[in-house]
Amino acid sequence: MPRIPPAWRRRAAAAAALLVLGGATLALQAQGSDDDPRGERTGGATTVFADGRNAFSFPAANLADEERTRFAIGNSFFRRNWVEAPASTTARDGLGPHFIARSCGGCHVQDGRGAPPDLRRGLGEQPVALLMRLSVPGRNEHGGPQPDPVYGDQLNNAAVQGVQPEAQVAIRYTPVQGRFADGTRYTLQQPHYRLRDLAYGPTAEGLMLSPRIAPQVIGVGLIEAIDEADILANAREQAAAGGPIKGQPNRVWDAPSQQLRIGRFGWKANVATIAHQTAAAFLGDMGITSSLFPDEACSQTQTDCRHAPRGAKGEGPEIDDKTLHDVVFYQATLAPPARRKADDRQVVRGQKLFHEAQCASCHRPSYVTGSSPFPSLGSTALQGQRIWPYTDLLLHDMGPGLADGRPDFEAGGRQWKTPPLWGIGLIRDVNGHQRLLHDGRARGVLEAILWHGGEAQASRDRVLKLSREDRAALVNFVESL
């Protein structure tokens, strides 16, 4: 058992008290059982019964007491801001030189979902939770995207003192008009992105730009514990079904295990493990180095970036392994909240329509979890649970309307991973919006469905023919998850 500093003990005690006072955790005794046919216990025995602004912020209901202490420590480093070096603190210094956020919680607000800038507040507002992936034609040494030689693999639109932000992101929208079979009109927003105020000269020829919104973090440890054989079985079953749905796994480089693994996280399934995702986000989003990614993301052209002060007195990684592991553990044990209104007549009707429209072909409802790839970074409480994430974790061609044209390991420019749907109905409670899809262009569930094309075109066309009442029922079902 590691020694915990007094300040961390106080924070852990405060967080534990909050959890008890919230009255939102209830351990369930149903490990691996199939006595939950409606999927109300979304995470099996890890499920919490919660709504409101903190609905995504509770630990797995069946965590042991000592694990809750570790959860609270990881929570602290997930939410609190990192600061520029040199600083009086040596535990949180090293922000930048380039960055887009000062903390993990800066993008995943309340462990929830980010949103694109609100243009009603002015065209100059810069995105925080909407990052821009960059690459040029070709592949890197691990088969992933080839970064821009000057700006790297991710645009950073903020910087510490004395260093230039790399560029600014400009976004505009054009309307896309449509009509349901009953004559009801709708309007979607087609976003257009470009970079301006490039601080280090032009980007490379053929630059590809891919916007990615920060998703909610609930249940990622359970996703990581899904057996790889189940994901591969999804692909085989879809291939054998003979219809348009032909999902494929993405195989990506995983730095912690130093091998290619099946991707599960990220909008293109371009990350295999929470440990890789966390360390990469510390570097890419905040400029915090770790033992996994020890070098600052400064290109040779960016001399101000290369000469900026380093955290940890420049003597080692800016986040030590123990702290990094606690942040990984924190995310791995964030519980999915229980499903709501499962016996509501309209929700039941919507569930039937969901299956009739073949939505469940990609949004596979449930699995029984196996074990975490890194036992010391997760909990045995996550194992053997019947969970209901509604995803196949496969890549699908979603048509030209959603295409970013940017390959990512084995993902093509029109392919995106099926995102989990659990908790989708609580995003508005937690984050005050419901901006969905990879760049937050959809303003709710129905708009997200209407953007579906490619392999999902037939399902979208079926929804276009639904009556107003059935459309509402379908949305209510999805929002009950």
Image (cartoon, rainbow, N blue to C red):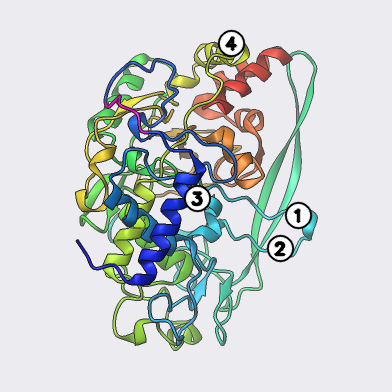
Real-space Cα separation, disc 3 to disc 1, in angstroms: 24 Å
Real-space Cα separation, disc 3 to disc 4, in angstroms: 31 Å
The disc labelled 4 sits on which kind of residue? Arg
* Mark 4 Cα-neighbour bin, 10 Å: few <14, some 14–19, many ≥20: some
The disc labelled 1 sits on which kind of residue? Leu
Q: Look at mark 1 in the image and give the residue it sits on.
A: 119
Task: State yes or no: discs 1 and 4 in contact (Cβ < 8 Å).
Answer: no
The residue mark sitting in front, 2 or 3, is: 3
Q: Look at mark 2 in the image and give the residue it sits on.
A: 125
Q: Look at mark 3 in the image and give the residue it sits on.
A: 111
Pick whichever, 319 or 59, lies toward us. 59
The disc labelled 3 sits on which kind of residue? Asp
Viewer can see residue 291:
yes
Q: Residue at x 74, y 65 (%)?
A: 124
SS category of the residue bearing label 4: helix
Label located before the other in sequence (1 or 4): 1
The residue mark sitting in front, 3 or 4, is: 3
